Amino acid sequence: MQNNSLNKKAKSWSGRFSEPVAELVKKYTASVSFDKRLAEVDIQGSLAHAKMLNAQGIISSADIRAIEKGLKEILAEINADKFEWLLDLEDVHLNIEKRLTDKIGDAGKRLHTGRSRNDQVATDVRLWLRGVSDEVLLGITKLQTSILDLAEQHFDTIMPGFTHLQVAQPVTLGHHLMAYYEMLKRDAERFADSRKRINRLPLGAAALAGTSYPINREMVAKTLGFDAVCENSLDAVSDRDFAIEFTAAASVLMMHLSRFSEELILWMSPRFAFIDIADRFTTGSSIMPQKKNPDVPELVRGKTGRVYGNLTALLTLMKGQPLAYNKDNQEDKEPLFDTADTLLVTLAIYADMLRGITVNIENMRKAALEGFATATDLADYLVKKGLPFRDAHEVVALAVKFAAKKGCDLADLSLIDLQKFSKLIAQDVYQVLTLEGSVASRNHLGGTAPAQVKKSIQRARKFISK
Ligand code: ARG
């Protein structure tokens, strides 16, 4: 048996073991294939830690100079794809530490003073997720801008508003689109809020109990831009609630985009023919030459399932774990990385796709005329003339039945015909029976009137430019 200190492949923790780790176990337990993605933040964290160790007199100035130089070179090697990642070295942390030690000798071995991979990895994930959160927030703003641009073009385009997917009342397309702006605004709030809890420093917690070295956690927090330090060492190395929160916010955002997608898919179907999506976002069928499929919204709808899956994975991973760190937590990375990747690309493609949408204004209007969408307006008209609402409801129901039998819209009925249902109806009724009259009358904060849509777009533009 080779002496561990002579065995180049020996694990950095292998001193107490009498046989090497089985090959399959090595593969099973290693995380380097995916956590190498954390290399940059890992180095960032190490630099801050080393700077503090030196400031506290725990390592020498010669050591810190060597560590800084070595880590910088390693980062350059990684960025140039010249770094050799070794499965034998388990994870990103040990790979980098080993390379550093190879480069600078004992100073490299001193870097890990007062630190454990447990607080190191928790710090890395937080640093990484903080950056992703900022990218997500930017992606949301860009998508919102696309929505606002489309809503502005169609602030007075009339379409049927649906409840139960049945024509209910006319609305403006601008108003409909602004509903999604509002959803995304809340999504942004959720990400900004979870970022606050992501942005706290675990380092200093060491393995679980803290360290006996005279460390300065506040200094490390400040160097790394954390708002605060995690105030309990056991909690700091153990909980991944911040990652769960992020993934929960991602799930809600994907749920919103999935709903939006479902509508775009319906609207593009020839049965609706409300919109067309630019060819570059659609695909054809290999067998049916006439087909043009809305693949992008369909995939957004589909990928929502995968993000929910990641949320379930993380919640289940955390459930039942005793304090403090357990290897289970290594499983936090892939669902988290996948969530970030899915979310960021979805936001980008969606913003782009909305710019490739053309609206068939005529078809939307025709559909709004089809379902007696102004029936409520007639009832409200009668109420304003003194009829109790329930009676007005009944009068209109009879008028609708009559028009349906005739095969026309309410607005197509003559005044004589309409007056058969109520003597209160006069010539001015046609103002409320038109689609334009109907939408224009809902002129209050949150209503569908074109004037209100314009105002809401203005408010939104001001808000997102802040
Ligand atoms: N690769 C590990 C992870 O991702 C790093 C922490 C390992 N800590 C330990 N005590 N084995 O969680």
Image (cartoon, helix red, strand yellow):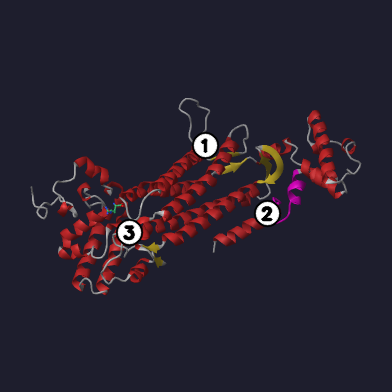
Instruction: Give the residue type at disc 3.
Output: Val
Query: Would you name the residue on which mark 2 appears?
Result: 446
- How far across and down, in percent of the image, does residue 87 sit? 22, 47
Query: Would you name the residue on which mark 3 appears?
Result: 41
Crowding near the residue tagged with mark 3, few <14, some 14–19, many ≥20 C-alpha atoms within 10 Å: some
In the structure shown, which secondary structural element does the residue marked by tag 1 occupy?
A: loop
Q: Which residues are magenta?
A: 435-449
In the structure shown, which secondary structural element does the residue marked by tag 2 occupy?
A: loop
Q: Nearer the viewer, mark 1 or mark 2?
A: 2
Q: Is residue 46 left or right of residue 269?
A: left
Q: CA distance from mark 2 to mark 3?
A: 44 Å
Q: Is residue 286 left or right of residue 436?
A: left
Q: Is residue 465 above or below residue 267?
A: below
Q: Is mark 1 within 8 Å of ligand 1?
A: no
In the structure shown, which secondary structural element does the residue marked by tag 3 occupy?
A: helix
Q: Is residue 170 left or right of residue 293?
A: right
Q: Earlier in the sequence, mark 3 or mark 1?
A: 3
Instruction: Give the residue type at disc 1.
Output: Pro
Magenta residue check for 157: no
- How far across and down, in percent of the image, does residue 370 sit? 72, 35
Q: Earlier in the sequence, mark 2 or mark 3?
A: 3
Q: CA distance from mark 1 to mark 2?
A: 31 Å
What residue lies at 20% left-to-right and 67% top-to-bottom? 66
Q: Is residue 420 above or below residue 6?
A: above
